[in-house]
Amino acid sequence: MEGSREQNERGPCYPVDALTSWSWDMLRQSSEEYVSKLHSTDCPGAQYFSLLTGEKIPIRKSSVSWLSTCRENSEHVVLILFKPKEQQTVLALHLNGKWWSVEDVLKTSNSSRQNLVQVRSIGERIVLYVLNQIICGLWETSPGDVPFLIHPANEYAKVFWQQGEAAGFYTVKLKGSLCDDCTSQCYQLSVLDTVFVRRKYRRLGFGLQILHDFRCTFPEDHELGISHPISPTMYKVCHKYLQSHPDEQEHLWEVEVPGYPGQRANVWLTIHMGQNSPVRAPDSSTLTMHTEDEEEGQERGCEGRIGVAASKGGNPGGSSLPDISENNSDDKTPMEKRLKRKRKIEDFSEVSN
């Protein structure tokens, strides 16, 4: 009873709080049992999921499906409820034995889950997926935005928690990790790869906090990178950060995979010369970087569709459905002294949007 009283005082136990000790197998088995009971004698009567608008969505085998939450592992799946005749519109996720709205999946009742927290549990991994593929990819996207890929299962990531809900995330390609499954090449330095902040949390300085946290997370690394191409808005964030941290100006690079010396461009140098990125334009395999505009509150978000892991109501592992510049500082730094001796850089092609 004491535990129940404490939980009531903290609020409801949201999925990210309840799934701390769950495995993907446990989650899948729980949802498989639920699917098997739909329209059976063990589950009498019609079932509905109520939206905030008051609309009730019938829960049938034809309106649920499996969703793969990572790029390479078909076992890491969750059961979703989608809108009838709109399979790309995710309404709820089946977690911890019940249906949760997308917004509730992003909430926590754990007061210690605040600011940037590393993703470790499957509950946190699901939060990362929802932020990336549903919030960033569908709800808060704009025409012309470029999508993030689904993150790998073991991608280093942190979720930004604010006032009991997930406000954003960033991910890192760790030094020494494989660039992809088709090559033996490894990242030559740790690279800040994807960043997203929800619209209602923009213009609050979270971009600067993320850069600072990225630096503090790898204190022993002399050089750190940001994935090419860096958006103009991210350049503004980098400019502010490097102005207030002059010792970092020589050590932050825009990086093309895998990040050998010839595949890097110094971020501060690029900003100071007033040029676009000297790193060559990316091919289709290059990961992109999208960040919030600290001044305008605009994000180069992600567009795309939710990829479903199996046929409606089926078992996981089936065939997939279609992919459902500011003024420079007057203070002289070591980097600025180097600029005086550096020959003029040739014009570079524009950063891809």
Image (tube, rainbow, N blue to C red):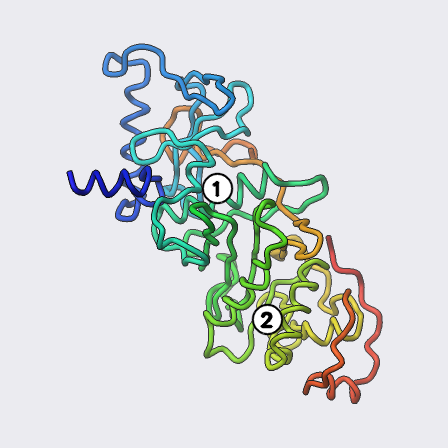
The amino acid on which the numbered mark 1 sits, given as a three-letter code, is Val
Instruction: Tell me the tag on residue 130.
Output: 1
The residue sitting at the left extreme is 1
How many circles with numbers are drawn on the protein?
Answer: 2
Q: Is residue 70 visible?
A: no
Give the SS element for disc 2: loop
Q: Quadrant of residue 62?
A: top left
Task: Answer yes or no: is residue 272 visible.
Answer: yes
Taking depth in this image into account, of 152 and 353 the one nearest to the observer is 353
Q: Position of 93 compared to 223: left or right?
A: left
- Position of the N terminus, as image quadrant, is top left
Badge nearest the viewer, 1 or 2: 1
Residue located 56% across and 73% down the image: 224
The residue at which mark 2 appears reads as 259
Q: Is residue 43 left or right of residue 125?
A: left
Q: CA distance from mark 1 to mark 2?
A: 29 Å
Q: State whether residue 136 is above or below residue 51.
A: below
Going by the numbered disc 2, the residue's amino acid type is Gly
Q: Quadrant of residue 242?
A: bottom right
Picture coordinates of residue 289, whole percent (x, y): 62, 57
Tell me if 4 is positioned left or right of 182 in this view: left
- The residue lying toward the viewer, choosing from 261 and 45, is 45
Q: Position of residue 49 (x, y in %)?
A: 41, 21
- Residue 126 picture location, percent across and down: 41, 44
Q: Position of residue 173 (x, y in %)?
A: 50, 63
Residue at image position (58%, 49%) is 148
